[in-house]
Image (cartoon, helix red, strand yellow):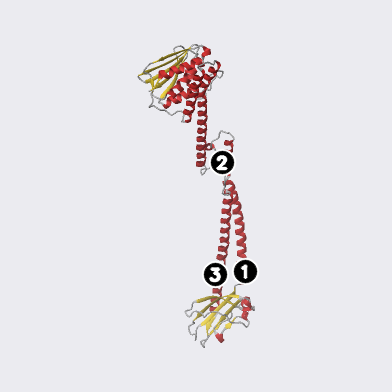
Amino acid sequence: MTTSGSLRARLLLAGVVGVLLAALASAVLLGAAFERSAQRAFDRTLDEELDTLIGLAEVAPDGRVVLRREPSGERYDRVFSGWYWTVGEGASRRHSRSFWDSAELAVEAAPADGGRLYDTVDGPRDQRLRVVEQRVRFDGALQPQVFAVAGDLAPVAREVREFRLLAALAVALIATILLIAIGLQVQFGLRPFRRLAHTLARIRNGEELRFADAPLPHELAPLGAQIDTLLDDHARRVQRARNAAQDLAHALKTPLAVLAAESERAGPELPRRVTEEVSRMRAAVERHLAGNLGADSRKRTPVAEVSDALLALMRRVHAARGLTLIADVAADAVFAGSADDLEEMLGNLLDNACKWARSEVTLAASLRDDGLCIEVRDDGPGLDADAATHALQRGVRLDQRAPGSGLGLDIVSGIAASYGGTLTLDRAPSGGVCARLVFV
């Protein structure tokens, strides 16, 4: 049997790939979201600082814009602290002490409409500065003034890196937990398949089990039902094969008994008897190979012809018992079927009757209002109603001490049913069994 890989490996691979992709995407998106949020928060801080700077400005009597006082705080007093402000343009530009002698910010000109301009530029000592700039026009001022505040992005970048590291660790931890959960889920999810294989192994070892009685999940229940159907079909096929073999063996039993009896008394009739019985066995084999119970109602077989031959055969087979075999067959008694099937039925009934009869067996056949009726009666011990019903079951032997296989009556019943007939067992007038075949 060829396999296409492990189902467990496929599920685990799909789960691992999915978790790793989701973890990578989560880490990247979380880092980008935090960086964006930190940038916006830093811009708001710059806006507040710029508002404070603009609030400190006023118009002098000569029309110049001056600061009432410079913004205070260590961030603007310490040289190259990373926080800077400027007011004005060109030679009149004023700036924070933290600039020292580098008061230029390479930013674009502020919008003339008073809007704020945000930009990222290089500052002193290779600092990356975030700058917000605005051109403000005061009433009474000679000209608009440009206000700018800049802050070092290094702390923001450091916070982003730290967050990315923490996010990566958290996502890695979550991914590890998810991978463990996926492994347990696959292990738990595949457990019904292992139980299915175990049940199949037990069935293969001969235990009588059905998947319909097994605790399978809803998704596997249809599979279990299909396997049950397959097993039932297999059992039926095996049983049919066994039945066919048993039926064939039973059909060969009488000819073999005749050959055995004839071999004990060799004479000029022996070759003819052997030829007849070999032909009978060959016909039985061909009939079973062709389907055993195929009914052909188009043929017409006089019952008398078959009964005479069978009674002569039974006299030879059961000669040691000294039985009286009587034929009471009407001339118009005709069986609507093949002679082989009629011979199979009557042969089995006569053989059973001869085994149990004390002294006499009668074969009677006649046409009645309900169709053809054939009776085989003996004067043996007989059967009660329960035993008669039980005796019709396949393989049942009411007396284990008597020879036989318990197949004959089941074979007769099957052949009769294929022609629309029935087989019943009643009590004969002599006290024995009356096996009655009725064909409508």
The quarter of the displayed image where residue 299 is located: top left
Secondary-structure class at tag 1: helix
Secondary-structure class at tag 2: helix
Residue hosting label 3: 40
Q: Is residue 310 visible?
A: yes
Percent x, y of residue 310:
46, 18
Please name whichever residue, 142 or 357, is drawn nearer the observer in this view of the structure: 357
Percent x, y of residue 429:
44, 12
> In terms of sequence position, does the residue under pointer 3 or pointer 2 come before the other?
3
Disc 3 and disc 2 in contact, CB within 8 angstroms: no
Secondary-structure class at tag 3: helix
Percent x, y of residue 86:
57, 80
Please name whichever residue, 284 or 38, is drawn nearer the observer in this view of the structure: 284
User: Is 288 placed above or below 200 here?
Assistant: above
Question: Of the residues shown, which amino acid type is indicated by label 1?
Answer: Arg
Disc 1 and disc 2 in contact, CB within 8 angstroms: no
Q: How far apart, in angstroms, are the residues tagged by discs 1 and 2?
A: 57 Å
User: Is 200 placed above or below 29 here?
Assistant: above
> In terms of sequence position, does the residue under pointer 1 or pointer 3 come before the other?
3
Q: How far apart, in angstroms, are the residues tagged by discs 1 and 3?
A: 15 Å
**Eye-nearest disc, 1 or 3:** 1
Q: Is residue 390 visible?
A: no
Residue hosting label 1: 158
Horizontal arrangement in the rendering, residue 84 relative to residue 317 (left or right): right
Percent x, y of residue 229:
50, 37
User: Is 427 placed above or below 202 here?
Assistant: above
Mark identifier at residue 196: 2
Which residue is outermost to the left? 369
> In terms of sequence position, does the residue under pointer 1 or pointer 2 come before the other?
1
User: Is 57 placed above or below 416 here?
Assistant: below
